[in-house]
Image (tube, rainbow, N blue to C red):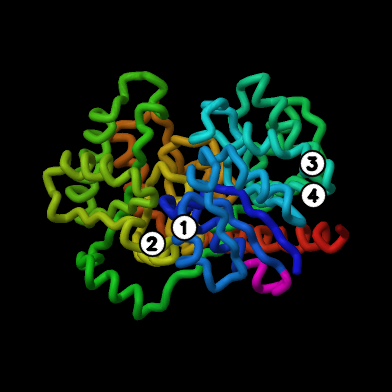
Amino acid sequence: MKTITVLGNNSGRNAGDNAILGNLLHDFSLKRSDIIFKIPTLSTSFISKSFGHFSVKPVGMMPWNIAFKNLGWPLYRAMTKTDMVLVTDNILFDRKFNNPFVNNLKSIALFAPFCKKKNIPIVLYNASVGPIDLEAGKKALQRVIESSPLVITRDIQTKNLLKDLDLKYPEVVVHADCALNTEVPSERRLDEIISRENLFTNPKGTIGLNVNAYIDNWSGGGGLNRENFCKIIGGTADALIEKLDVDILFTVSQIMDMGVTRECVQQSRYQSRIKVVGNCDYTFQELTGILSRVDVHAGLRTHTLIFCAAVGTPPISINAYPKSAGFLRTVGMGDWTIDFEDLSVESLTALMSRAWHEREGLTAAMEPVVKREKEKSRESVTLVSNILDSI
């Protein structure tokens, strides 16, 4: 048996992170049965409960495991007692570089030379990198990349960043996010959820929205604070209800976002026509299934956009992360974005209304592009297998 350590945000709180890990494990299971996956995590019970049907070994990262989250004995052992390390998602950045409760890069870079010495390859797997703004961050990233025979990224921005930083790096392959291959539950299960939550009762349709708790960060210290943002989102929901006679569904993909979501709903005059569902109650597959029934969706969290693309629902990005706009470009939806400096009730309502009227054409145009992106994501298994078998 081979052992692969998978590094990512695998605590269970974020549906997007759960989808990355779940689809990675599923994609490998389609081709190989000889791999045990070590998963460093803050919640070993979550990994066992959600992914125990795969060959997984949760690695506890709590203080009683002699760890300060990303820094400590468990991560060192997971990275140095394995055949390969896969780095997923977007965990290699230098924001709060010296805080192991936030930053992964410094800890991974600390142990990467030990991997190199023991000939344990570190492979970025359908991942993103950045931002890297500090010299210390650049040096740390170089230490990680020096142990990498291959970088598989989910966006061209990562490839450009490595070049712009003037790092020494191996071959870079641009594939796609693992979450694109999310499979929805059965129609029976979806109908159960829809009935329980009383969703999609309006024959005119339902439009989706998603927000996150970091609004003060994304507004860049400008006038768009949390209160103003919630007024814009609530006002947009009202305008769409009045203009199109649709209902509104907020999808929460990160547990911490429920508070700001409720604040947005409270700004609406039509709260009886707004529903909220979230990953505190439903799996990433179930949320994706729900999003398959939405006409169009606008969101801040990148993975709600990815879930929509996976099931043919036209996504619109409220640009909180560069990776969101980058993802939409890869699926042919690059024009369907709005930046914070342009955000208003009028601008967001106009963009979402236009997408709603054009939704059938947008879905048809996305379909072949998304199909190819899904194939690219799964092709990463073969590239990693070739490296693993050569060790």
The C terminus - image quarter? bottom right
Distance from disc 4 to disc 2, alpha carbons, whole Å, reads: 36 Å
For image coordinates 38% across by 34% down, the residue present is: 214
Estimate how packed mark 4 is, as few (under 14), some (14 to 19) or many (20 or more) residues with alpha carbons within 10 Å. many
Distance from disc 1 to disc 2, alpha carbons, whole Å, reads: 8 Å
- What is the magenta range? 27-34
- Whether residue 238 sits left or right of residue 332 in the image: it is left
Q: Are marks 4 and 1 in contact (CB under 8 Å)?
A: no
Q: Which residue is mark 4?
A: 120
Q: Which residue is mark 2?
A: 287
Task: Depth check: give the residue in front, 28 or 272.
Answer: 28
- Answer with mark 2 or mark 3, whichever residue precedes in sequence: 3
Residue 265 on the magenta segment: no
- Answer with mark 4 or mark 3, whichever residue precedes in sequence: 4
Amino acid of disc 1:
Phe
Q: Nearer the viewer, mark 3 or mark 1?
A: 3
Q: Is residue 372 visible?
A: no
For image coordinates 69% across by 35% down, the residue present is: 109
Position above or below: 161 against 242:
above
Q: Position of residue 106 (x, y in %)?
A: 63, 32
Q: Are marks 1 and 2 in contact (CB under 8 Å)?
A: yes
Q: Secondary structure at mark 3?
A: loop
Q: Which mark is residue 307?
A: 1
Q: Position of residue 27 (x, y in %)?
A: 64, 67
